[in-house]
Image (spheres, rainbow, N blue to C red):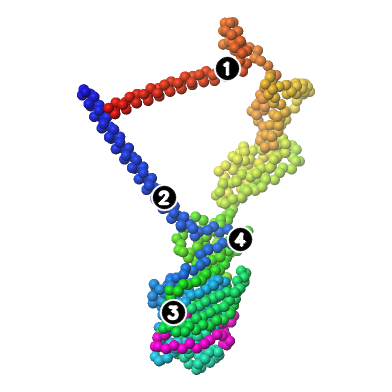
């Protein structure tokens, strides 16, 4: 083996190694890039879909539902779902625990559940209550009331009622002997009534105007006044300096008609001591609102001590109370509803936040926030819509007013007007509808009604006196303004030249000849177009308000001329054939007689086809030769 062969083999081997390395590297880069991009795009898409799942498009006069109407089983343990009012202070957040009153006289503390309870469904929940008197040996001398409340009022109303509902002497009309439900209409207290008041506790046992171990179910009337008698109550004694008891509420609805505002059912209250022993149960068949707010109350008067509540691990079985939220679409300038845009209705959970956003806006929302997109209203732009926390049984405030700003509108007027050179102007010209649009928007082209026969638009004049050949040219670049725009379309009449009698007779004979020729057919049975179609074209052009010009007239003449001429063979052979020898001409004629369909055009196609086949063969041979050389090269490389 000579040096050249050795050098060739070494070079070839080196190149093959480099090629293998580069191909593997390229393959790795492709796979890595594809995998990275796939995971990145998939993650981004997933996040965007997740963010949009709580956003819905509002439509006027339609209803929407936020869904998510069942409470999680551990909702009562979530401190984020409770709001403290008055003297209440959260002690433990992992499992919600609160000091309602901490050794203060004449105090009251609420822990209010942020949502509401759907009383059309079965309900059950429980909690642990503790009481410890401040100074007395009687543990029940720790205050006035301790237990659960159910009320149709919203949490805001309950808080305001506690602050403002005071008697003339400054004492509360809410707590104390009113058990925390004074001033709350159609509400219920379930728990320990720790003081036997002679004026309002007519069915209770024990010493009047003294500490009491009674438990009871108490209600207010529709005026928020405590019902003084005919209520379930019983004595439940207990011992110890600190008493801890479990209180449980069960509700079984018996009437759940969809359209009823109220629901009738049986309410059961059960109390049992932490130390065991027999449980005591009270029950009452009552009628309540469909959606009730839940709260915990602890209040003190002259007797006071430490009153607490803590959640239990028992499941919180309840559906969420819902309310209708009305979304109004208002004109900002008039504060009145926008015509033809009726309110939308959203069925939402009490305590949820509803946000209404403008087009293409997005918001970061939590599980209890539901966002909606406002509808687009022609001629208006979205301004604002305040967010709303849904209140319980508060139709007056469960309203979102979406305000829109009316955009300024510009108008464009169009009208036909006869040209001054039109003698007969007795025919009434049609009316053109105006167009309108937002300021600085392009002027819209109106729909032009047809003009009478033989009339056309000769020019268009604008307000400032500018003249244009067509309306399209006149409105091009024009935009609506605060001032109204005017476009006058000048109408002229087609001038028909007067003909002499001689010309008339010629035209008559020509028409007869055209009719005769129109009936002729070519040898291949293709019907010749009749000249009347050209007249139709003329009329259509005039009907389309276009001015017939000299060029179009010449075109019509040329077309008519072609149709008028009879079908006949060429009188003269092509120059190339005439210059051929006679024998060649005869040969060509003989060939043409054999192939009557052969023409110069067909011959050109045949020649081109033959050339194409030849070129294709050359390419094919070249390709095969190339493959053969490549194969030989591979054999050398392998060696």
Residue closer to the observer: 445 or 353: 353
- Where disc 4 sits, the SS reads loop
Identify residue for label 3.
128
Q: Main structural element of the magenta stretch: helix, strand or loop?
A: loop
Name the N-terminal-most of marks 4 and 2.
2
Name the N-terminal-most of marks 1 and 2.
2
Q: Is residue 575 above or below residue 546?
A: above
Q: Quadrant of the N terminus?
A: top left
- Where disc 2 sits, the SS reads helix
Query: Does the magenta portion include 240?
Result: yes
Identify residue for label 2.
41
Q: Quadrant of the C terminus?
A: top left
Task: Please provide percent x and percent y for residue 105.
Answer: 43, 87
Q: Residue at x 49, y 66 (%)?
A: 353
The Cα atoms of the two marked residues, 4 and 2, are separated by 38 Å
Q: Mark 4 vs mark 2: give the one in front.
A: 2
Q: Mark 2 vs mark 3: give the one in front.
A: 3
Identify residue for label 4.
61
């Amino acid at each position: 083996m000579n040096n050249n062969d050795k050098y060739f083999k070494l070079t070839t081997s080196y190149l093959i190694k480099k090629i293998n390395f580069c191909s593997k590297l390229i393959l790795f880069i492709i796979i890595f890039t594809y995998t990275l991009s796939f995971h990145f795009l998939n993650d981004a898409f997933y996040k965007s879909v997740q963010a949009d799942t709580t956003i819905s498009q509002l439509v006027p006069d339609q209803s929407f539902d936020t869904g998510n109407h069942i409470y999680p089983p551990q909702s009562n343990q979530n401190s984020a779902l409770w709001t403290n009012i008055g003297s209440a202070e959260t002690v433990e957040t992992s499992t919600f625990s609160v000091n309602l009153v901490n050794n203060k006289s004449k105090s009251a503390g609420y822990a209010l559940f942020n949502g509401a309870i759907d009383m059309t469904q079965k309900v059950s929940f429980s909690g642990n209550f503790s009481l410890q008197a401040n100074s007395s040996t009687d543990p029940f001398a720790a205050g006035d009331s301790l237990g659960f409340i159910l009320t149709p009022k919203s949490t805001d109303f309950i808080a305001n009622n506690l602050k403002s509902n005071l008697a003339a002497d400054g004492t509360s009309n809410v707590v104390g002997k009113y058990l925390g439900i004074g001033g709350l209409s159609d509400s219920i207290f379930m728990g320990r009534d720790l003081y036997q008041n002679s004026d309002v506790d007519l069915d209770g046992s024990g010493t009047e105007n003294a500490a009491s171990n009674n438990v009871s179910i108490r209600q207010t009337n529709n005026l928020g006044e405590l019902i003084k008698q005919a209520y379930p109550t019983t004595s439940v004694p207990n011992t110890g300096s600190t008493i801890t008891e479990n209180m449980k509420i069960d509700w079984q609805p018996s009437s759940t008609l969809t359209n009823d505002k109220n629901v009738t059912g049986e309410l059961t209250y059960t109390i049992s001591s932490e130390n065991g022993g027999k449980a005591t149960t009270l029950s009452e068949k009552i009628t309540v609102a469909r959606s009730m707010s839940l709260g915990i109350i602890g209040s003190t008067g002259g007797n006071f001590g430490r009153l607490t509540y803590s959640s239990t691990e028992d499941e919180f079985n309840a559906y969420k109370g819902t309310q209708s939220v009305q979304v109004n679409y208002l004109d900002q300038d008039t504060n009145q509803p926008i015509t033809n845009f009726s309110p939308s209705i959203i069925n939402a959970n009490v305590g949820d936040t509803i946000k209404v956003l403008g087009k293409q806006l997005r918001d970061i929302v939590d599980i209890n926030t539901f966002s909606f997109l406002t509808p687009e209203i022609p001629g208006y732009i979205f301004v604002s819509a305040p967010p709303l926390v849904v209140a319980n049984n508060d139709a007056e405030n469960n309203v979102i007013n979406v305000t829109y700003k009316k955009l300024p509108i510009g108008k464009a007027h169009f009208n036909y007007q006869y040209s001054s050179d039109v003698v007969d102007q007795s025919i009434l010209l049609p009316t053109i509808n105006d167009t309108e649009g937002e300021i600085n928007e392009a002027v819209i082209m109106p729909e032009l009604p047809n003009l009478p026969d033989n009339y056309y638009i000769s020019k268009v004049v604008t307000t400032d006196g500018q003249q244009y050949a067509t309306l399209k040219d006149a409105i091009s670049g024009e935009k609506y303004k605060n001032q109204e725009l005017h476009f006058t379309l000048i109408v002229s009449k087609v001038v028909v030249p007067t003909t002499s009698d001689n010309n008339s007779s010629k035209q008559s004979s020509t028409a007869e000849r055209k009719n005769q020729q129109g009936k002729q057919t070519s040898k291949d049975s293709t019907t010749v177009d009749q000249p009347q179609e050209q007249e139709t074209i003329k009329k259509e052009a005039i009907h389309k308000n276009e001015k017939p010009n000299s060029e179009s007239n010449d075109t019509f003449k040329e077309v008519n001329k072609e149709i008028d001429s009879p079908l006949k063979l060429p009188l003269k052979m092509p120059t190339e054939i005439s210059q051929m020898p006679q024998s060649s001409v005869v040969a060509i004629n003989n060939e043409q007689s054999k192939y009557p369909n052969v023409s110069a055009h067909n011959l050109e196609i045949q020649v081109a086809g033959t050339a194409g086949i030849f070129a294709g063969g050359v390419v094919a041979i070249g390709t095969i030769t190339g493959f053969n050389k490549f194969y030989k090269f591979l054999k050398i490389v392998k060696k």
